[in-house]
Image (cartoon, grey):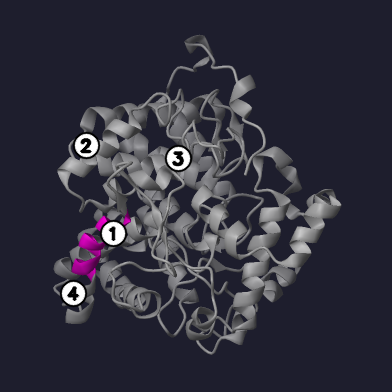
Amino acid sequence: MSDNHNHSNSPIPDDAQSKDLDAKALTTTMLAILDQNNQGDYTSPAKLYPHQWLWDSAFTAIGLRHIDPERAAREIASLVRGQWSNGMIPNMIFNPSNQYRLDRDFWSSWLSPFAPDHLATSGITQPPMLADAVVKVGEKLPKSHRTEFYRFMFEPLVQYHQWLYLERDPHNEGLTLQIHPWEVGLDNTPPWVHQLYDHSRPWWIALIEKLGLQGFINFIRRDRSVPPGQRISSLEALMLWDVVKRLRRKNYNIERIMHRTLFATQDISFNSIMVRNNTQLQTIANIIRKKLPSELLTQMKHSEQALDKLYDDISQQYYSRDFITHKLIKEPSIGTFLPLYAGTISKERASKLVKLLKDHKKYWLHHPVPSVPLDSSFFDADRYWQGPSWVNTNWLIIDGLERYNYTELADELRQKTIQLVNNQGAWEYFDPLNGRGLGAESFSWTAALTIDLLNQ
């Protein structure tokens, strides 16, 4: 938890500091960033992140489709090369360069019999944004190529969604469980930090904290190019590393992992994204006249109602849930708005979420939408997923607002997001109070989604 609230000394800039928007020039600048990060088969998120990430590639392709739909299709298709034989699409495919050998060894994906033999990946997945990206990229391809692309991606997508239910929904609840914060992409979001401190704080990490050795850990971190106050804390980073070590020790076998685990969460953001992408998988099936397996269709339908289990009537918000205890983890975060993206909640609940979104004392700050509300004890305007605004979550919320016909609010958030990038550049994330760019520079999904927002 953050000890200081940076908003106390974060002045809100006046309108004179905003730059005039030249959509063509901004698009050119964003495309140059995507070209700069182009690794051939994929686009790396930034110089700091040399590998391929699942939902990063999905977001990148969504923006690239407006400029180069063929490259966008290759970006998506390249993810299939890392798919495991059990259907999982990992959150990372590693750059094969010798300088990243330690990264590959850290995960040791080859310990699982399901991992591919020809390349190294991580052993976990990430928010399943892929089907939505496939549909959107396909819309920009020539009709003949679109059908070919959809057919190429169909079976890998079916296998991936089947894996999500087979391996991650053991009780047929319609909600999938996640076994690491990296699986939800919001690494240090408060609900998961709460779980980390409750269930995943080994003695040696507690000793490091007691002896005040965090500074040494900070010194050896690769992400030192980002100021410490903008990153996940060193103690939390160690806990995330320790969770991977345990998963690796069990060869990424979910039965062994769940046999004695105290740490599994049904995450609201992950499951909301899954529900929307279930719908998009059905869209692909309809276009190419393929039938989805009947069991998968039943599971997908179940998930649409299952999000209700993550709703709290008292606070009128959605939360993640502890898989073991089935208790809601009542730490508010931006995840509460992602059922709008899912598109299957009631109009009544959507209206309550919109009311919360427009609250100027919580989420509708000068540069919305912060990753946690301003009144949260976790709020830190600079620190990763504990306060800053992100373009990708804004994009998800805008998409949901549009489909619930909150078009004016969606347009306002769209314009605010574009202007933020126009003023500061394609940073990884932004201070929600003064708009300052934070994290890694020249960030791919920021650039790509800005292009997409400009074209909406």
Q: Is residue 309 magenta?
A: yes
Whether residue 422 is visible here, answered yes or no, is yes
Q: Earlier in the sequence, mark 4 or mark 2?
A: 4
Q: CA distance from mark 4 to mark 2?
A: 28 Å
Quadrant for residue 50, please give it: bottom right
Q: Which residues are magenta?
A: 300-310
Residue identifier under label 2: 351
| Dominant SS type (magenta) | helix
Q: Earlier in the sequence, mark 1 or mark 2?
A: 1
Q: Nearer the viewer, residue 255 or 148?
A: 255
Which SS class for mark 2?
helix
Q: Amino acid at mark 2?
A: Ser
Q: Residues within 10 Å of mark 3 (few under 14, many from 20)?
A: many
Q: Residues within 10 Å of mark 2 (few under 14, many from 20)?
A: some
Q: CA distance from mark 4 to mark 1?
A: 18 Å
Residue identifier under label 3: 391
Q: Nearer the viewer, residue 180 or 442?
A: 180
Say which of marks 4 and 1 sits in front.
1
Which SS class for mark 4?
helix
Q: Earlier in the sequence, mark 3 or mark 2?
A: 2
Residue identifier under label 4: 298
Q: Which mark is residue 309?
A: 1
Q: Earlier in the sequence, mark 1 or mark 3?
A: 1
Q: Is residue 417 above or below residue 256?
A: above
Q: Is residue 80 magenta?
A: no
Q: Residues within 10 Å of mark 1 (few under 14, many from 20)?
A: some
Q: Earlier in the sequence, mark 4 or mark 1?
A: 4
Which SS class for mark 1?
helix
Q: Nearer the viewer, residue 421 or 144?
A: 421
